[in-house]
Amino acid sequence: MYLKNAWYVAGWENHLDGGLLARTICEEPIVFFRGEDGKIGALEDRCCHRSAPLSVGRLKGNEVECGYHGLRFDRTGQCTAIPTQELVPPSACVRSYPVILKNRWIWVWMGDAAKADESQIPDYFFLENNAWANIDGYFYVECNYQSYIDIQLDQTHSPYVHPDTLGNAAKLRVKPSVKREPRALKCERLFPNDDPPPLWAKAANIKGKGDSWNRWIYTPPATIMFDVGAAQANTGAFEGNLEHGITVHNAHGITPETGTTTHHFWSNARDFGLDDPETEEQLSVIRRVFREDVTICEAVQRRVSQFPDAHQIDVAMDYPTLQARNMLARLIKEERE
Ligand code: FES
Ligand SMILES: [Fe+2]
């Protein structure tokens, strides 16, 4: 069950460079493309004639030509030409999806097109800003998207899944402060004068104790933005002085493909050492760190698929992830009603 009247991240802008992009989102196969005029389109990936996937056809100017018998479709999904006949019946059409390019991400609206509201797309400005350098990625993950959102929102896994990079013992001691808004969940954990996560401690060149923090904003259904960082302890980082510290922003677009497969579009953005190869190399480890999440979540999915009715317990540390699940469940319920 998915929230339909919502924006999902469908890809990085450069995923359109190869022509027609086939991507299944919320179990709906879609073909994405960029026309000669530079505008992008998203159509149901099933020809209305004999059901050939349009993604195995060809891009012709601003239209998609089916690779079976050559019917052509414009960005609205209307068929514009049928070989062997003059007349194109109005019923010759496929569904088109509202689609927008924002901050280098392709965003697609999966529900009622009349309700598509661009203002609901969160502003991940740091994905496309000269003051920030990005390490980008895309993972195809074989697990349910909600369990993959769970791991991003839950920092208590870090000492176990990422012990040498993001794990610090304080993550288990400090209770998160969670704030609910109508369409967002915000969480903050501050770790003053404590052992900072090794990765940030190294990047910020911290000696001994540090002040570190982990803040996220979850925008349902499936995007998350992080502000994390660390500074030498007691140098005013919590008040905004980053002279002795660093901050990075992470963006996660976690898009369900099916009930057990997920697209993960991510970026790690920094506003320091922009052209410094050493910083770039140091932070590139984030790719391996995010892969560690994939490994554990895929292992979990295999067990869940094997024992779908097995009882799971909730414990105190699940508080933020349960809040996020409840928020999404409420939105889905409201949409259905
Ligand atoms: S299946 Fe597409 S033109 Fe025939
Ligand atoms: Fe993780």
Image (tube, rainbow, N blue to C red):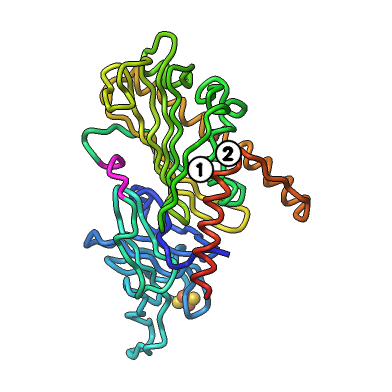
**Marks 1 and 2, how far apart at CA:** 8 Å
Q: Which mark is residue 292?
A: none
Q: Specify the amino acid type for callout 2.
A: Val
Which image quadrant is residue 55 in?
bottom left
Label 1 element class: strand
Q: In this view, does 273 lie to the left or right of 259?
A: left
Indicate yes or no whether the magenta region holds residue 13. no
Nearer mark to the viewer, of 1 and 2: 2
Q: In this view, does 102 lie to the left or right of 151?
A: left
Q: Say whether marks 1 and 2 touch (CB < 8 Å).
A: yes
Residue 89 pos. (x, y %): 38, 90
The residue type indicated by label 1 comes to: Phe
Q: Give the range drawn in magenta.
A: 123-128
From the image, tell me which residue sits under label 1.
139
Identify the residue at horizontal 50%, vertical 70% (top origin).
334
Image height check: is 60 above or below 273? below
| Residue drawn at x 57%, y 22% as measured from the top left | 163
Marking on residue 294: 2
Camera-side residue: 214 or 58?
Answer: 214
Categorize mark 1 by other alpha carbons within 10 Å: few (<14), some (14-19), many (20+): some
> What is the quadrant of residue 72 in the picture?
bottom left
Q: For the point 35% across and 23% down, which residue is it? A: 280
Q: In this view, does 266 lie to the left or right of 152?
A: left
